[in-house]
Amino acid sequence: MSDTNGGKRSFSAIASIIIAVVLIVMIGLALSDARGENNAIRWLNFGGGEGGGAGTTTVEGIIGSEKRDYFEDPEVKSRLAELGYTVKFSTAGSRQIATNTDLDKQDFVFPSSGPAAQKVKSQGGSYSVDYPFFTPMAIASWQPIVDLLEQEGVVRNTGDGYAFDMGAYIKLAESGKRWRDLGDTFPSPRQVQVSTTDIRTSNSAAMYLSLLTWQFEQEKPGMSTEELVDKISPFFVGQGYSESSSSAPFRDYLSQGMGSTPLVLVYEAQFLGEQMKDNSRVRDDMVLLRLEPTVVANHGIVGISDKGKELGRLLSTDPELQRLAAKHGFRPAESGSLADELQAHGLPAPSDYVNSVDPPTFDRLEQLLEAVGQRYSGQPPANEEATL
């Protein structure tokens, strides 16, 4: 009798183990299916532009430093999350992005000019390029400096702002005059000179070179490359040390005052975006000068992976992301209005008309950049921007 009971107990124990194993397997399969559904939802959220939160997909890339504030904006982050994105980025000068980046490790790159974007695109047959927004180059200065340059015929009051005549400025700079020669308002011994970034690393300096090239070729068509480089080089090497990317000179302008930075080449968006901040550092005596002619920085995002391509498409077509670009001083390509954003902050809107010239092709620009870069005595500055 006891053997029979023992056998029953053994059978019951074995049956319990089998049932437990079956239950574990069934639970595992159920969890696996659930994870599969969740992964599908995440993918659909990313591809279809709905949802967000825990379903976001991380997209990594390199951007020009002047777009840092845009991507760090909580509203931009929130909207991207709704569309299925978390964007992780580092910053670099646009020339570095175009010529010295391991593209296989990036989902996208976002330099600050059309030529740089096209140069990157040419390196991959499947790469895409979108242009979500653009901004003209401009000069950040100070009212006392503006008054001095008005007397010299370099600056004129247009009624809705100030224009900076590049041709007149070049003649003044080539004369070798120092600020103290223009009057007692700013008795600095420094030469009259626009501060830029280092031409060997940064797009904004390359845009300045584009303007100088256009001006000199207008004066003397058919000028040889060597002649052109001789004319252009003093406008860069005469500055002394210059920074690697565009955020640094503008930061110095905001913090160090007129004595350090009387004239600074900036993206229009940097100045206007700072003006629209709640705690703006732009003071009443700071003045934005419209370059005549200017050159437009057409910010092109190059999609390398499928994720990067989709990010470029959404930045260009999503109305909210376009509006937020205007909030940061950019001129949106598709929708949104810079004028509306400025007026909402009680600020005057810039003219829709931009007297601009086309930059050289990337290869021609690269030829000039290399030649002018050889006139520098030191090494290019290191990229001091933080990786996020």
Image: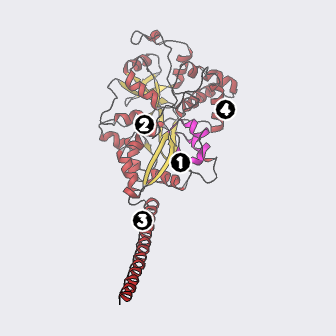
* Residue 213 shows in the view: yes
Residue at image x 41%, y 77%?
17
> Residue 79 placed where, x, y %?
38, 52
Sequence-wise, the earlier of marks 3 and 1 is 3
Q: Was residue 99 drawn as part of the magenta stretch in this picture?
A: yes
Q: Which residue is mark 4?
A: 367
Three-letter amino acid code of the residue under disc 1: Phe
Which of the 4 image quarters holds residue 70?
A: top left
Mark 4 and mark 2: span between their CA atoms? 28 Å
Task: Tell me the magenta residue range.
Answer: 91-120
- The reply to whether dot 2 and dot 1 touch (C-beta < 8 Å) is no
Three-letter amino acid code of the residue under disc 4: Gln
Q: Which label sits on residue 108?
A: 1
Three-letter amino acid code of the residue under disc 2: Ala
Few, some or many residues within 10 Å of mark 4 (<14, 14–19, 20+): few
Q: Disc 4 on helix, strand or loop? A: helix
Residue 334 vs 172, above or below: the answer is: below
